[in-house]
């Protein structure tokens, strides 16, 4: 078995797949290590399995979920069929302080969480990249929007992004495929918000990595619905549908599933080896590469780095700054409002799509809010009762059928997603008293919402209600969900980028300050969270880091 390569990529998800594509297309023999099993879409995807062919008729094996996936089932996508793409919590434990719960929702298989992700993609702007420096929070990003703009373009042209151009400076437009259509209730609320607030607040269709026309050899979406179970047509972007096939086409990728990375070896200023435990045999293995790209997801990557100790790095490799594991962030979510949209009773749910609306951030954009820094955006959309409610409605005969034709009013909801500030005490460390099924110390995650995040919660709900009422929505009700950190599944920030090696782990190209052939490419590199869904930024940063690494290799600097 070959053990030496030009490059080793750890993880096969959103960023690992991009690294595999970019490095192989640059001519590097690349090993991709994935902790979980291989996924073959034609065999393993289940998006077209009807409810009547499911053993539990879609209700899931509740005993199995309670015993083996008690944490993972907190994600809506961990249902009867989707649960196959989530980890076994017994084999993959983690710990938290009693007073700081954290939901670590994860997938360990080829493709990672790119199989189940929400597919929402939004660019960051200089409002985000400059925020820390402007407000004296954390450290400054070592890059600005101009550094990343061409890489956003590059990534979007490959993955395919459906959306509508708005021309907003604080939410730059993407390279768009045609947008999906708004439902009648959504268009009505959009127009009402426009009348009430002008250009200050704009409701648009969501920007998503789902194809609205054939693109790059992948088929346009036919809107079958349960995307969290996979997509055999490759109509939404995932590693399995796009980047890994591109890497495989070069003939230079070796994909090794069932490879649990234990730690990284270090010698003479470089990563000398990647130490692996075979998931099935528990055999210890080692692989070598001239360059190593770590994209196992924020918490897993941090765990690997912390577990990689040596005389030079007794507290984890590349951790001379002491910041590794600190400044963990996630987005807040679950505060907003909903109500009934009058009219349109003669219009059924006439739009088929797998997307919602988006209302970009408007707080702390042109004027300062007195109670908190940064801001929030809304997702959500219009809905109406459908025939499916017959499964939970009692009755028989003609009367029952007639009740099902009375669909009731259209409804509209705005669901807030808010920024989380970097805080040193929000952190990931190793719990040496607990190990996983492969004998590796598990992560101990300490993270909680703090004053700034909590100050946004009421404003998210009240502002949503005010906008809906201004748009003519009736019976408006605010809501507050008690979601702990981790529930949004946007964890980031534990190996942050920066200009100063004394206060950061990585430089502006995702390269470790301390270890020149190590690049960390997942959400752990983030310096602030912004409030936008982050995966597009991870992909753009990864493509940029790969180009930098290839140039350095060609110059014999790595």
Image: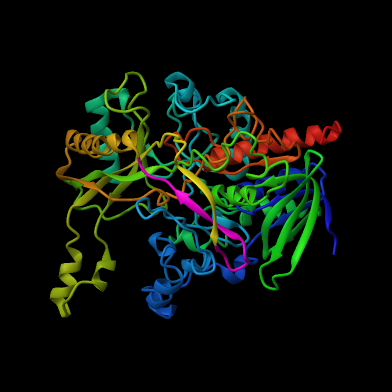
* Residue 53 placement, left or right of 542: left
Give me the residue at 20% from left, 67% from top: 404
Instruction: Residue 513: give x, y in percent of width and height.
Output: 69, 32
* Residue 552 placement, left or right of 365: right
Give me the residue at 44% from left, 35% from top: 423
Which of the pair 444/508 is nearer the observer?
444
Instruction: Residue 352: give x, y in percent of width and height.
Output: 39, 54
Instruction: Residue 366: give x, y in percent of width and height.
Output: 35, 19
Give the residues drawn in magenta, as a range: 434-449
Task: Please check the rendered image and state whether residue 442 is part of the magenta-colored stretch, yes or no.
Answer: yes
| Residue 194, image quadrant | top left
| Residue 77, image quadrant | bottom left
* Residue 234 placement, left or right of 419: right
Placement of the C terminus among the 4 image quadrants: top right
Q: Is residue 163 above or below residue 94?
A: above
Instruction: Mark yes or no: residue 246 visible.
Output: no
Give me the residue at 66% from left, 68% from top: 279
């Amino acid at each position: 078995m070959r053990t030496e390569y030009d490059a080793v990529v750890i993880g096969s998800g959103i960023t690992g797949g991009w690294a595999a594509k970019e490095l192989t297309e640059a001519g590097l023999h690349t090993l991709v290590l994935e902790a979980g099993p291989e996924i073959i879409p034609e065999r393993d995807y289940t998006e077209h399995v009807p409810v009547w062919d499911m053993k539990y008729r879609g209700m899931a094996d509740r005993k199995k979920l309670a015993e083996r996936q008690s944490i993972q089932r907190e994600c809506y996508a961990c249902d009867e069929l989707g649960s196959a793409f989530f980890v076994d919590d017994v084999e993959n434990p983690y710990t938290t302080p009693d007073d700081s719960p954290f939901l670590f929702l994860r997938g360990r298989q080829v493709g990672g969480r790119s199989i189940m992700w929400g597919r929402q993609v939004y660019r960051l702007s200089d409002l985000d990249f400059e925020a820390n420096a402007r407000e004296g929070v954390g450290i400054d990003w070592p890059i600005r929007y101009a550094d990343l703009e061409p890489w956003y373009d590059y990534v979007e042209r490959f993955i395919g992004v459906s959306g509508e151009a708005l021309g907003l400076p604080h939410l730059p437009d993407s390279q768009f495929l045609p947008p999906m259509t708004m439902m009648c209730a959504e268009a009505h609320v959009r127009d009402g918000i426009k009348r009430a607030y002008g250009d200050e607040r704009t409701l648009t269709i969501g920007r998503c990595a789902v194809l609205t026309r054939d693109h790059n050899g992948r088929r346009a979406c036919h809107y079958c619905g349960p995307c969290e179970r996979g997509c055999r047509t490759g109509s939404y972007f995932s590693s399995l549908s796009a980047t890994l096939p591109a890497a495989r086409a070069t003939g230079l990728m070796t994909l090794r599933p069932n490879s649990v990375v234990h730690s990284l070896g270090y010698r003479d200023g470089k990563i000398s080896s990647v130490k692996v435990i075979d998931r099935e045999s528990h055999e210890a293995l080692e692989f070598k590469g001239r360059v190593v790209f770590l994209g196992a997801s924020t918490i897993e990557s941090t765990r690997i780095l912390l577990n990689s100790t040596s005389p030079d790095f007794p507290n984890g490799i590349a951790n001379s700054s002491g910041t590794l594991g600190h400044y963990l962030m996630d987005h807040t979510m679950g505060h907003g409002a909903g109500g009934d949209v009058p009219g349109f009773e003669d219009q059924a749910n006439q739009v088929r799509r797998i997307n919602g609306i988006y209302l970009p951030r408007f707080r702390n954009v042109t004027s300062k809010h007195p109670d908190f820094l940064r801001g929030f955006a809304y997702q959500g959309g219009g809905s109406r009762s459908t025939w499916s409610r017959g499964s939970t409605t009692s009755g028989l005969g003609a009367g029952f059928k007639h009740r099902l034709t009375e669909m009731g009013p259209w409804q509209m909801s705005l669901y807030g997603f808010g920024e989380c500030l970097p805080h040193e005490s929000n952190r990931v460390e190793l719990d040496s008293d607990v190990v996983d099924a492969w004998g590796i110390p598990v992560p101990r995650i300490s993270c909680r919402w703090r004053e700034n995040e909590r100050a946004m919660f009421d404003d998210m709900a009240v502002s949503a209600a005010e906008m809906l009422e201004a748009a003519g929505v009736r019976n408006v009700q605010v809501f507050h969900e008690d979601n702990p950190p981790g529930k949004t599944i946007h964890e980031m920030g534990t190996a942050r980028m920066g200009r100063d090696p004394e206060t950061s782990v990585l430089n502006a190209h995702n390269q470790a300050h301390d270890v020149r052939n190590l690049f960390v490419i997942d959400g752990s590199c983030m310096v602030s969270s912004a409030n936008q869904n982050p995966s597009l930024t991870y992909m753009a940063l990864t493509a940029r880091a790969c180009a930098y690494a290839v140039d350095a290799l060609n110059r014999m600097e790595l």
